[in-house]
Image (tube, rainbow, N blue to C red):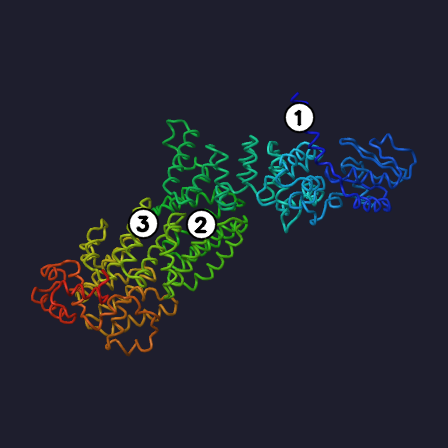
Amino acid sequence: MASTQAKLNDRKKDRDLQTPFNHQPHKRLARSILADTARLVLVSALPGTGRSSLLTQIEVLSGVPLVTSPQELAANSPLCLIDLPMNVQFVLPQDGGRIIISAAPHQIAGFARLQLYGDVRIVGNADLFLSDDDPAFDQSGGWPALSAFFNRETPKDASPSVPITYVRDTVLPALTGGAVAVLHALALSQRGLDAAPLDADARAELHWLQPLVLQNGHRWTFRTSLLGQIFRDAMAGNPVEHRTSSLLEAAGEPGVAIRSALAAGHRRRALAILERGGGVMLGHLEGPGEARAVLDAFGQDPDPTVMALRVMIALKSGQASHAALLLDAAEQMILNTTAEPDRASLLTRQNIPPELRMVRLLMGVYSDKPVNTNFYAEFAALLAEAPPENHLLRGSVYNVALDEQIRRGRVGEALATGDRALAHYDAAGAPYLSFYIHVHLALMHLMAGAPNDAEPRLDLARQKLTETSFDTPQDDLFLTLLDAQVAYEQGRPEAMARFAETAFERFAYGELWPTIAAQALAFGAEALLQLRGAEAALHYIDSWRVQMWRTRRFRLLVSQREILVLQSANRWREARNQLEAMATRIGHIWIESAGENLTDLRDAEDLTQALIWLRQKVLERPRDTGLGDQLAMLAANPHLSWRQRQCLAIWQAWSARRRGKIGEARRLLAQVLDTTAARSCRAPVMEERQLVVDMLDDPRMAGGPMEGRPVPRDLRRGALDIAITGLLSRQELRALLLLSEGCSNKELAREMRVSLPTVKFHLRNLYAKLGAADRRQAIDIARSRKILTT
């Protein structure tokens, strides 16, 4: 009974999809066919397009009977009308009249010869589909059978299973294997099939299927989105054949091809597509979302390329620690399966596949670990092993080396390495990876104090990002940050401050290289210090501390930046206390006894720490007899960056002026102003504005080399002691700051390195200038007048 009912339901569905077609278009087409002179008229179209209705019209108009078998044809008839069954071949007679036949081209023997001589007319889907003025076009796409169904049924009554069942049970069995493969690929595709790489057979099938499918620009898609959904549902249970996977891969959707192959149980095919589709760099070619979907489909597959991709996606997600655990586990698994247990300890890294070794090098970039000789050996080994045609792997190895060269300030090497990486990525058609190279090089120019050179690189990076086919919100933030850094270096900190205030959460917890994180930390804090004050800058620095997964080196950068902000805010005592508490090689005793060792410092961490100690000394004891020699020895260090050298020259000018060497102070300050203006890099002057403004306001500094020197715009905005230069002396200001920290008179004498009577002398003058009776009132008045910010 149930079986009988199912058959009745199927018949009802078929009836629902039978047309009463509009016979007028078919009459016009039938007359046109009968008037044609071509010996063969081939009606070749999808089921449900009205082929039977058209043949009936021709039969009525011509009076020639419609037959279904070549054997039924009348001899020497001037016109034969055939509805050829599937899988039946037809051989065109040598003699005879015209033939009108409903069949597929492959059923006609010698069909290509007929086409070549132009003795054939093809009536196809394009002749039978309805135009877009059909009332049900959005649902049917103009397919006559579906149009009739949707025009009869109201949307609430139209069962979606009817057209799905019709396509599955009636349409697909009537098509060739090639047409089914193309439709399956289109149904699985996420953005349509790219026309350019398709082979001739696939292009022929797509052209035959028109207008069920259309070519929009360079991609083939279903005529309407609902048609695509109908075919997707109708083919949901179909196994994905090799032809379908190949079409998806050729059309630029390796991720979909991989998932489809895996769903059909073809792991080897999926792995081969992954290898051809970018392997470990799949996420950089198709997007991280697509790569994650592929990894979900593979599950815990032990293949090295899959494991390398899993590590890479963890890195891209900002999960460097998790990526390191995945990488360790992958390498251990490979070692355990490629060697006997008692020989595992003797294995070298050559047993690890190149993809995982490259990811290991990249891990060093993300974890900010110091580079050793093994890095360069591994770099050379990977380049030697990677085939010349493996552009993705070779470009990625150069990319890793580029980051190290930038951090070491090797500009020439970095430019050459960047060009090599770009050449490989361009050859691989990987605009997203080229974007990263341009961002790296822009960052290098910023670190070298050349913002004007960074701008063209950012323009190129922006162009490559527009060529990327997937959304990259984190990389949009990279560009926003670097644009703000360029403006900051040029003396315009507003954009950098806005970035620090509004984009930190989205930026800091995504994919983040230590180099760019360090720049965001430093420039964001300095911009906030200039425009919002010390508390805003310190709050921003504290927000970076939340990321405890970062390395010891990065945590040190956070502490160093906090000390620099405290120094700039004239909170020298807090700054010195933190400096003395830091567990680093460069401490107070080392600085005081270093001598010529200052010239020989090489490590970036040591150099920064030495600079911070000397800045502390410049602010606290500018007249110290040995300070000038210490600054000069550090200035002779060849490993200083250009920006560090400019700040150091400002300190030298400040110390020289405080020691009465006005000529030397003028020369040094004039040189800094000229150099920073010439490179449009005014940030070093802005960062030391409290010292620069004080020197510019000293009448003794005018004239000579200082005559007409360029001064950055807005130099006086935001510096704490600029507003009080005309009110308090520097010692009075220092006494006020120490009072706000709760120091007693004895602590003031120790901190200021003066006697108790001298402390009382400065306090009397301070109270008189502020109109205060005691220390508490002096602090309250200073805060109300914005002399103190805390």
The foreground one among 313 and 22 is 22
Residue beneath disc 3: 554
Of the two numbered discs 1 and 2 on the same chain, state the one appearing first in sequence: 1
Residue beneath disc 2: 399
Measure the alpha-carbon separation of dots 2 and 3.
21 Å
Mark 1 and mark 2 residues within 8 Å of each other at the beta carbon: no
Q: Element type at marker 1?
A: helix
Q: Residues within 10 Å of mark 3 (few under 14, many from 20)?
A: many
Report the side of 228 relative to 512 (left or right): right
The foreground one among 589 and 447 is 447
Mark 2 and mark 3 residues within 8 Å of each other at the beta carbon: no
Q: Element type at marker 3?
A: helix
Vertical position of residue 694 compared to residue 130: above or below: below
Measure the alpha-carbon separation of dots 1 and 2.
63 Å
Residue 6: mark in rendering: 1
The foreground one among 59 and 432 is 59
Q: Is residue 711 visible?
A: yes
Q: Position of residue 530 (x, y in %)?
A: 31, 63
